[in-house]
Amino acid sequence: MPIDDLWYLTKRGPDKKRLPSKRHGRGKRWRVRYADAAGEPREKLFERKVDAEAFDLECRSGVAVEVSVKREIERLTFAEYADRWKESRESGWSVETRRRVPQNLRKRLLPTFGDRVIRSITRTDVMAWIGRLLDESVARSSIVLYFGVLKSILNAAVVDKVLSDNPCDGVKLSHILRGISRTPKWVPTEDQVLKLSEVVPRRFRAAVWLGAGEGLRIGEVLGMEAGPRCMDVAREELHVIQQLRYSTEHFGGFYLASPKSGSAGTVDLDAIVAEEVEAHIREVGPVEFEIPDITGERCLTRSAALLFTSTRGKLISGRYWSELWEDWRIAADWPKEGTFHSLRHFFATTLMSNGVEPQEVQKALRHASLRITLETYVHWMPKKDRRRGLVGQILRPVKDSQPVGPAGRDRI
């Protein structure tokens, strides 16, 4: 933090005395250059050298208001700032975002960064965190979501002058994930699916068939209700228009929401799946609930006869389902990679390997684009042998009809 004399140049004349500057005798003489709390270069002018020296000393010691960082900011943790960030923005979020972001924070961000002073987080820390998510086989789409939340929080911290820059800015997530395939890590065989249906209790067996026979996700299965709203047997149609969600912060717990973005739709109802669901309705029966429904333009509370409940007739949260599934997975001798979503993979790969057109598979899975379907399941497309000599056979009649004559000279 040098002190500059603005009235004189550093250059000296023949008499060894410093030469006067153009500002000589005008304005304040002494300038102190320093970096402020955000690291930006600043300067301050003084009339007296003693005052400039005193200010320079305060800057060097960190006492000066201009360079000091508030004690609150020095000790501010990521968890504390993230909580402020969430509270300041959630009023403008959709219900699904208000549910998802706190969950992302709680499960994936706070365990790593929560207790860290936010100013201490580096790009290396972010890269190491992404590496751990990859080691844990977290889905690529989920990593993109988690990273997006982290980057948004740190961007806000930059705007609020808590950080001088965002450690996420130099992380090329798309490059990191480029080599990760969408291909499922494990897909059950027909025998393994049947073994699972044998060990699952009767009240949940139809859920397995909806996963394996229709490709439904677990939230969509738990959100299925009796009647033509979801299953129209006469038309042989399955309407995937809702899923069951649970949040202690919204609607008092359970509510019905639209399926994963862009994946609502009507698909063909498999006859065997229809039989299983109808048997479930006869033997187990649906249970009526008054439940908030946000699948429309506004929230309403309505009566819904949901198909799958606990033995006590209660709705099933994701955590409770995971506990049930773990027991069934072990009993069916499935690997740890075997989740309910594996039944969706079974459904898709069975269609693909049996020659169903990729566009039809996309429609059945309700993927937003054909590219997603192909990237995920292209390895299961049947391999067709290409006929050898096909082009030659097509051209032979033309060749045989050409007149035979003396060969001409080549033209260059």
Image: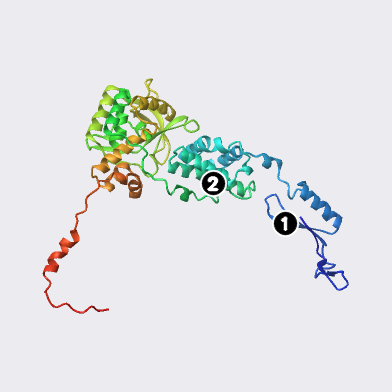
Element under label 2? helix
Q: Camera-side residue: 374 or 248?
A: 374
Q: Quadrant of residue 236?
A: top left
Q: Which residue of the protein is positioned furthest toward the top in this rendering?
A: 312
Q: Camera-side residue: 124 or 354?
A: 124
Residue 115's x, y, as percent?
61, 36
Residue type pointed to by label 1: Arg
Element under label 1? strand
Residue 234 to residue 61: above or below:
above
Residue at point 67% right, 39% down?
75
Residue at point 56% right, 37% down?
112
Residue 349 to residue 385: above or below:
above
Residue 52's x, y, as percent?
82, 55
Label 2 crowd (10 A; few <14 / some 14-19 / many >=20)? some
Q: Quadrant of residue 110?
A: top right
> Left or right: 129 with respect to 296?
right
Label 2: which residue? Answer: 151
> Left or right: 159 with respect to 50?
left
Residue type pointed to by label 2: Lys
Check residue 42 in the rendering and tell me which mark sits there, or answer none. 1
The image quadrant where one finds the C terminus is bottom left
